[in-house]
């Protein structure tokens, strides 16, 4: 299976859709993590993010319409960072993380999405693709703005936000 | 109140600090001269899971959870309903917390006092909800505020002045919130020196007192804390703890160290014990003393690692291949873990064999405030060959069966210890006389030893008896006490020494008994069958066998007794 | 796709990575590297187009060993340290299945160390993924064989283990493993690729995935800054691989050795007989 | 003669070929329509050690050695005295050999016929002393010379004509030396198809008939020959045998293969079984059928690997940690090894659990000429999920307790088998209901199964019973037969199914029994205690427990019975 | 002699090799290589002047594992595969003793494989002598880990094991062993020298002795024609040793690697306390 060419329209759309889908999956995972560790506020936030990203994915799907896109599982995409830009790193969650921190993760992800599309906009060869990239970049910038606003509703974490007086559990 | 004990459950999700609050409450109660205990329960998550600290505070030593809880204090309710079965409430109980009480609890009809610990804590920086809860419940049971402050300070001292101050103010905010809360005062009675200790720690201390200076082990829940206590302790007194690659290695390391003369011990749980049985048999056959503390958890297989059960009795008694007589000792309470471990080491050393100590999760991981256990001293030690002797025979058949062991380094007594059947010199032999002689030796040295009164805890008299063991004794004793005023007199027999069996002593203990109920925490009635197999009591024998994960409560026993003796 | 055939899976399917996930929510700590390994495995399976019902994931005990239940494949969460023989029995008797083993460094290199040696020698066509966090997570943070000798945060070894760490890759090579690779949970796509390649490679494949334990070894969050691709291509020469791995610093990623030994195949008779024929020899 | 059986011992040192002579004698007897058996005894040396072939030839099937030997034929006497306890002689016995008879034998008062086999063999090239001895003893018991020649030819054919001819002449030299020897003629009675088979082979065949197609094992005495038989046999019928690195690996390989749908088995002995118990527990908890054949040898520890004992009963019954109900099946004779192994596979598969087959060295390594065992066919097999089902639950609680198992490859029924306690789907759970449900399921599926009459061998009636098991049955039956003419009527009860216990059936079997004697080959009375634990018979219960290495002989039992019922 | 001190044996004695032999006659087959190993050990001990009572020889189960009883030292004939941990416990708690482990290839590399790995890492000052005959002698001739894949004389593997042989020296190196050597029973004096050097070397020393099983592998009698000294001196560089051992044909004799890791020492407190002091922490 060859890598998908992001500089052509079908490839570009495949990437754009993958970005959203992976974000949905990642936020769903995070929401579940927070459920399991009883961090309800963060869970709700991540669930909300998953919902929003699902909407974005739907929008892109609508734009794709009936076109067939190149097929490929996520590891075949040549993400700049190895990983889809809008999916925060698995290692960045914490069971005591505050909403502020959760939204910081989101914010960084959205920023990476902006950069991703801006790069294509700058470096692309296909005009239609560049135009779409510009459009998407703009949208992502809007997301960045909104997330930043959203984050402002929450206080930054206290110094010892991750202080847990109790020892970890042991199991098997 | 009739019951001098108060039961308190603290619940909250990960990070809320319920365990810390519970521990501090227990320690403060101890400082106030009260007895008590705390056990823990939590979800499967390593971090952030829901947790419950289950306490019982009393004017007398207490070793099991009560039938009901007086207070349920929720720092938050996240997933707290999972503990519903563990925290029985009734209309006399009081619930404190946010108002989104799970149905499982509110259905009890308990009185509810709304307190949002999170909101109270949000008032000012550095306040912690768990400290507010601690202040509240400490006051509710009448603990002097000074004691709560003292324990909090001790814990937080290293975090600096601000933290300590915040805690103190959290405690007083909690106390102030008492308003409208039904409180219960329990009065200090104890004058004894009190210890705050877990069963695992007590067993560790017992081991050290027994002379153990070498420990090799592989971590496993719920035995790990015993090792965690032993590692630095041994280092301090010139001993060693080795973390081995697995249980096969650890038990064999013990055999090696003990062969060299060092009393040796390991701690494990069911799956680990299963891996050790082959080599425990080697210790038996080669007459090398070793002690294996098995902290039972729910079985079979990986089972329920964090919950207690008495279902490793079978493997401990019978799990070695061949005829391999060995010692099985079972502590009867958190504090008895100390004595039992020490005694087991003493017996293993004196009788040159393997001893299994059957503790369980509920003994091992419960932290209790108890009177300082009395010092026990056992005179006899391992019989060691002290001088070169041309005709030295390691496995000589001597009166009593215990032949002195030469330790490497002693000139002229070189021998090879062997797990193959052997003659008196240790040379492999399949001759019928050698096999018979060594089988008899290994059996008789255990059978002939005088175990004294330590063999069992026996109490009461009359024709009705309860036979029980280990952690089941505490609820049995409470049940018996509860029934006494009703005129139901019960005899209690709880062997501490499970192997070798003591038929004469048991017969004496059962003298005049017409009906007996065998109480244990297993599914298959393992103890019941053991009693039948080895003591074949002539009385009517009934079984109350209940598996984990819930502890046996006094009321369960009371109920079973009433069922049993309904007619009588 | 030949790889799929090698792994014994018959039907090709087109599924998304998430279709390989089950409904059960992991009990892992948020931030644990194992989440990423889970993602990597689902991606690898999706890329290989192997049907979930033709995959069996076998594990022992440990945080990482919880993984089978989180996958919508067949799974076996067995005894501590015994996943490899369990998988061996399964694969030998069911060569049509794609058999993965996944677990921790304690499970695999401490209590399970012997099976690791022997499975490398036996070369049955299974893939072994070790989520190495250099600690026993499940039992609250004791040193594992891969722990540095001076790590002193466990109460059981308060001055560190002061014994040499275990280098799984070089031991695998010395024991005859046919495919040896290292991946990192900080790069789930990279890990997915390596895992996919491992599954596709005939015979026993071993993939060490650096997977931080954020609870007991929070400093491992920094691993993502240290890991880097191995500078050269996978070698097929054991001596060259040995030289490389003896001096390896544990942070080079990629496929490091790829042997071409034929996978183990059980004996089989040309002409199968009946049970009746077996009796003949007993007749007087 | 009252006893239709003749007992013959052949002794000689390494290289003398006593085992070959013994085997040929047995085979020739079979060809002549006689039944018989042969067991072996030898020194600890791998090569060149003294050896004894102990035979019993009869007109009826025989499954244990007799009380005495009719013939002791010594090819040479090197170290033969070591076998004295195994070869009881009396004044009716005949000793054949060189005249340097060890005192241990000559003291018996047996008739002595001097024959120097070595000297006879020296007469001519190619003559072998053991063949001369074979010719002699074959004629002495009246075997047709043609049969002896036939078996010798079959064995030596590949060595060429000269060798065969030398053998034939050796046989006739032996026969000719009969002169002056007391001979015993036993007459052919059997018309059945006869097999010459060892218990290990029979168990192997039973396993294959039961459907086993995967075996993983680690060699150990005295189980190895079962594996040696299975390796080529499995290959022929499309199965596989894997030599594993150890017993931990082999039992886990079984679990894996069985999880994939292949009936799987291993064979081991005590030390190996001890290593397997942890994972046998996993098979129980995960409900994965596996069969472990444990061929008992003398214990404890490495013990006496080449001798028989019934002392692994305890570990087989109780050796798993936690409450882990499983099957324990014990063959009652060499030929019953076939049925018992097949039945155990059937039961393990049908009940989705672990089965332990308790064979022993004396069953396993004895070679017997027996009537061809009847074919048994068990209809039921493993309940397998055959179609995708959205709500499939691997551990569903269904009537009877056996829930269908989905095999990998079946779409839509993916699940994870687990050794942690789990809910009906297999998800780990520590909830009280889940634990109770699965504990009940695992117990009930075994308890509710109808094991039919196979559960035990029961014979006779009256108020006196012998309860025994495994290889002890044969001497018990002979003892009972011996006593019958004296008017001592005995009931014999020998359970083949040791777990799960069958209280109702046992109660029926014991109906009317006033005194029972429990006969077993152990030191600790393991079977006796098991009977008391689980059947608590109301009758008087006595124990005859004798450890190895000597086999229990009919006369030992007769003696014990007379002691027991002296008064009655 | 410092070596003796390293091995923990305090007193120097002057004894003949035969003084280290016990009265018990070996049950081994005449011609078995183990006789020569027994001789080599007695010579090494005599040369080291270590008192027999300060020596403990630990073994598992197998023909070779019978050796302790034939020596007039202290001995332990333990369980199959478990000699190394037994010796580890003994040496850690009795550093004054000279502790040897002796046994077979099955005992050491099959059932005991994990302990072999871990003992190499742990580097306790013991010496491990494996009498390698590439077969399970005691149980009548099955393939062991060191058996060639095509040896088909065992009924359990009638077409050979067809799995890679286990190369103990390279695995020992990969696992961190501190001293690695090979000797041959055909040269008992050479073997004695190597064993003596191994005992003298601090930390864990591993000596493979090629020791034919004349009963089940009579062709091994020819080994004496094949063995030859290794062409170069012992190296202290693991990478160089790895290169050498990965291509080693199993017949070069001599000390092949000599590391300089410090032996394992248990933790010990500067100021020992009393048992009473341990109670302090429990006081309320
Ligand atoms: C026989 C046995 N011994 C010990 C244990 C306890 N135990 C469970 S998991 C574990 C170590 C897990 O470490 P690792 O494999 O590295 O997994 P992680 O939790 O780090 O992912 C131990 C010692 C057990 N379950 N069984
Ligand atoms: C737990 C266990 N499994 C199996 C055996 C059987 N057994 C005894 S020695 C041995 C192999 C011995 O081989 P090796 O160590 O090479 O010694 P050798 O006889 O060749 O010197 C085996 C499998 C045993 N005693 N214990
Ligand atoms: S304890 Fe460590 S390994 Fe276990 S889940 Fe948490 S982070 Fe992962
Ligand atoms: S069988 Fe082999 S290893 Fe055992 S004593 Fe004989 S020759 Fe030596
Ligand atoms: Mg780990
Ligand atoms: Mg060998």
Image (cartoon, coloured by chain):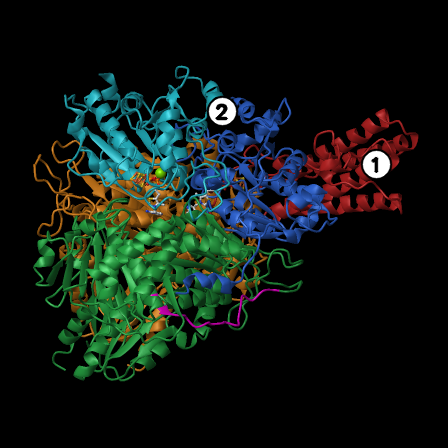
Chain colours: A red, B orange, C blue, D green, E cyan
Indicate yes or no whether the magenta region holds residue D345.
no
Which range is magenta? D369-385
Residue at the spot 27% in from the left edge and 83% down from the top edge: D461
Residue D437 lies, in percent from the top left, at 49, 66
Most foreground residue, D358 or B430: B430
Q: Give the residue number, with chain letter if any, for mark 2.
A: E247
- Between marks 1 and 2, how big is the CA–CA gap? 49 Å
Q: Secondary structure at mark 1?
A: helix
Residue D172 lies, in percent from the top left, at 26, 59
Indicate yes or no whether the magenta region holds residue D383.
yes
**Ligand 6: image quarter:** top left
Q: Label 1 marks which chain's residue?
A: A
Q: Which numbered marker is on residue A11?
A: 1
Q: Which numbered marker is on residue D58?
A: none
Q: Label 2 marks which chain's residue?
A: E
Quarter of the image where the C terminus of chain D is located: bottom left
Most foreground residue, D568 or A21: D568
Query: Is residue D162 toward the left or the right of residue D554 in the image?
Result: right
């Amino acid at each position: 299976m060859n890598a998908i060419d992001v500089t052509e329209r079908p490839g570009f759309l495949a990437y754009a859709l993958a970005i959203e889908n992976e974000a949905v999956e990642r936020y769903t995972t995070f929401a579940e993590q927070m459920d399991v560790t009883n961090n309800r506020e963060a869970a709700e936030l991540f669930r909300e993010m998953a919902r929003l990203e699902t909407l974005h994915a739907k929008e892109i799907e609508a734009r794709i319409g009936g076109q067939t896109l190149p097929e490929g599982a996520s590891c075949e995409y040549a993400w700049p960072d190895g990983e889809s830009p809008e999916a925060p790193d698995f290692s960045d969650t914490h069971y005591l993380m505050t909403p502020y921190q959760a939204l910081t993760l989101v914010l960084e992800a959205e920023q990476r999405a902006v950069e991703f599309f801006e790069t294509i906009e700058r470096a692309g060869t296909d005009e239609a693709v560049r135009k779409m990239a510009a459009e998407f970049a703009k949208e992502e910038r809007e997301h960045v703005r909104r997330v930043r606003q959203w984050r402002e509703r929450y206080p930054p974490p206290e110094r010892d936000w991750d202080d847990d007086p109790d020892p970890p559990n042991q199991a098997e | 109140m009739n019951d001098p004990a108060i039961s308190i459950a603290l619940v909250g999700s990960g990070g809320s600090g319920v365990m810390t609050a519970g521990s501090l409450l227990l320690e403060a109660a101890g400082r106030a001269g009260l007895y008590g205990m705390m056990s823990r329960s939590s979800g499967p998550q390593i971090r952030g899971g829901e947790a419950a600290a289950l306490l019982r505070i009393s004017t007398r030593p207490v070793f099991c959870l009560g039938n009901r809880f007086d207070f349920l204090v929720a720092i938050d309710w996240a997933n707290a309903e999972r503990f519903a079965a563990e925290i029985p409430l009734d209309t006399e109980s009081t619930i404190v917390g946010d108002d989104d009480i799970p149905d499982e609890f509110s259905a009890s009809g308990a009185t509810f006092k709304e307190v949002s610990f999170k909101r109270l804590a949000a008032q000012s920086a550095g306040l912690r909800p768990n400290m507010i809860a601690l202040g509240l419940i400490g006051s509710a049971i009448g603990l002097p505020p000074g004691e709560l402050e003292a324990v909090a300070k001790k814990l937080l001292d290293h975090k600096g002045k601000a933290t300590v101050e915040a805690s103190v103010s959290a405690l007083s905010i909690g106390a102030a919130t008492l308003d409208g809360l039904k409180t219960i005062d329990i009065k200090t009675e104890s004058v004894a020196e009190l210890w705050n200790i877990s069963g695992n720690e007590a067993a560790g201390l017992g081991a050290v007192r027994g002379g153990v200076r070498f420990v090799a082990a592989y971590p496993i829940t719920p035995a790990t804390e015993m090792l965690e206590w032993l590692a630095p302790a041994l280092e301090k007194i010139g001993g060693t703890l080795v973390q081995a690659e697995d249980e096969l290695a650890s038990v064999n390391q013990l055999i090696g160290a003990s062969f060299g003369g060092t009393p040796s011990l390991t701690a494990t749980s069911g799956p680990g014990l299963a891996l050790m049985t082959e080599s425990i048999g080697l210790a038996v056959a080669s007459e090398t003393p070793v002690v294996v503390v098995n902290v039972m958890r729910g079985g079979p297989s990986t089972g329920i690692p964090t919950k207690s059960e008495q279902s490793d009795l079978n493997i401990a008694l019978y799990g070695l291949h061949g005829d391999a007589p060995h010692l099985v000792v079972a502590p009867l309470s958190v504090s008895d873990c100390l004595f039992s471990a020490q005694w087991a080491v003493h017996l293993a050393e004196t009788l040159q064999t393997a001893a299994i100590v059957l503790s369980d999760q509920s003994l091992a991981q419960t932290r209790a405030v108890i009177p300082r256990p009395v010092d026990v001293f056992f005179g006899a030690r391992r019989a060691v060959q002290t001088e070169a002797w041309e005709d030295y025979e390691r496995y000589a058949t001597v009166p009593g069966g215990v032949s002195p062991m030469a330790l490497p380094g002693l000139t002229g007594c070189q021998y090879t210890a062997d797990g193959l059947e052997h003659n008196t010199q240790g040379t492999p032999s399949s001759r019928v006389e050698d096999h018979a002689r060594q089988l008899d030796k290994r059996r008789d040295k255990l059978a002939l030893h005088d175990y004294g009164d330590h063999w069992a805890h026996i109490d009461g008299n009359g024709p009705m008896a309860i036979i029980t063991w280990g952690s089941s004794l505490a609820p049995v004793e409470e049940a018996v006490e509860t029934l006494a005023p009703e005129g139901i007199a019960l005899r209690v027999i709880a062997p501490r020494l499970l192997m070798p069996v003591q038929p004469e002593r048991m017969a004496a203990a059962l003298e005049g008994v017409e009906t007996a109920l065998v109480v244990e925490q297993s599914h298959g009635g393992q103890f019941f069958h053991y009693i039948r197999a080895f003591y074949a009591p002539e009385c009517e024998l009934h079984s109350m066998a209940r598996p984990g994960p819930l502890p046996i409560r006094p009321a369960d026993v009371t109920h079973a007794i009433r069922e049993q003796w309904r007619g009588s | 796709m030949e790889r799929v055939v090698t792994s014994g899976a018959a039907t090709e399917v087109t599924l998304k990575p998430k279709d390989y996930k089950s409904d059960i929510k992991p009990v892992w700590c948020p931030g644990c590297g194992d989440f990423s390994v889970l993602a990597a495995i689902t991606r690898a399976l999706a890329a290989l187009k192997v049907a979930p019902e033709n995959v069996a994931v076998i594990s022992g005990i440990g945080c990482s060993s919880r993984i089978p239940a989180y996958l919508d494949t067949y799974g076996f969460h067995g005894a501590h340290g015994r996943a490899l023989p369990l998988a061996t029995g399964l694969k030998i008797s069911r060569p049509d299945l794609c058999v993965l083993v996944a677990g921790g460094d304690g499970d695999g290199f401490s209590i399970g160390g012997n099976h690791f040696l022997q499975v490398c020698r036996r070369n049955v066509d299974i893939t072994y993924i070790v989520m190495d966090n250099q600690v026993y997570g499940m039992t609250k943070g004791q040193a594992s064989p891969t722990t540095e000798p001076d790590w002193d945060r466990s109460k059981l070894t308060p001055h560190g283990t002061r014994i040499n760490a275990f280098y799984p890759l070089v031991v695998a090579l010395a024991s005859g493993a046919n495919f040896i690779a290292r991946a990192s949970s900080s790069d789930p796509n990279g890990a997915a690729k390596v895992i996919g390649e491992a599954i596709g490679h005939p015979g026993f494949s071993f993939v060490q995935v650096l997977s931080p334990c954020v609870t007991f070894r929070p400093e491992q969050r920094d691993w993502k800054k240290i890991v880097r691709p191995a500078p050269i291509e996978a070698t097929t020469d054991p001596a060259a691989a040995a030289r490389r791995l003896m001096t390896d610093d544990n942070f080079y990623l990629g496929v490091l050795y790829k042997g071409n030994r034929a996978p183990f195949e059980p004996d089989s008779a040309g002409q199968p007989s009946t049970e009746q024929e077996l009796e003949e020899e007993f007749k007087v």
